[in-house]
Image (cartoon, helix red, strand yellow):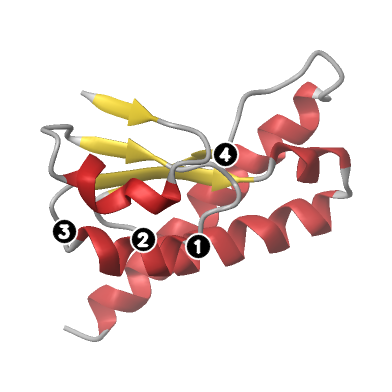
Amino acid sequence: MCCFSKGTDYAIEELADAGYDMLSLDWRCDPAEVRKRVGGKVALQGNMDPVALHSSEEVIEREVRKMVTKFGTQGYVANLGHGLSPSHDPAKVGRFFRSVQDISADMNRGAQGKL
């Protein structure tokens, strides 16, 4: 069961102890900080600001890289920090997904090489 509770970063520890399997974070949360605060009790999901999808493909890739780097690739589901709007270009959404896949695969290959 996943909990998305927008604007409740003040209660992350309580939410991690509430019995959820995953917490979905809005775009205002710092993934690295939340990861420390939940201590591995739950998986995390999120949290790129969907406004970034109105930018260039280069900006989308840069924002995805920042997000995935902060979350890591394990115990994590890449997602937006809130929903899409009708004004979002489907091609830019596709770029988001391709960037997540490519960057995550690169990170995982790098981790495999260090074992």
Out of 11 and 31, give the one closest to the viewer: 11
Secondary structure category for the residue under label 3: loop
Q: Is residue 17 left or right of residue 11?
A: left
Residue at 26% in and 56% down: 74
Where is residue 17 shown, x and y percent of the image? 13, 44
**Mark 4 and 3 residues: CB-CB less than 8 Å, in contact?**
no
Position above or below: 83 against 19: above
Q: Left of 104 or right of it: where is 94?
A: right
Q: Residue furthest bottom?
A: 114
- Tag 1 near tag 3, CB within 8 Å: no
First along the sequence among labels 1 and 3: 1
Disc 1 packing (10 Å; few <14; some 14–19; many ≥20)? some
- The residue identified by callout 2 is 34
Q: Return the residue nearer the eye: 107 or 59.
A: 59
Q: Position of residue 26 (x, y in %)?
A: 53, 41
Q: Earlier in the sequence, mark 2 or mark 3?
A: 2
Whichever of callouts 4 and 2 sits on the residue coming sooner in the sequence is 2
Q: Nearer the viewer, mark 4 or mark 2?
A: 2
Q: Nearer the viewer, mark 2 or mark 3?
A: 2
Q: For the point 70% across and 56% down, which residue is it? A: 61
In the depicted structure, whether residue 33 falls above or below residue 28: below
- Judging by the rendered image, the residue that carries numbered circle 3 is 40
Q: Real-space Cα distance between discs 4 and 3? A: 20 Å
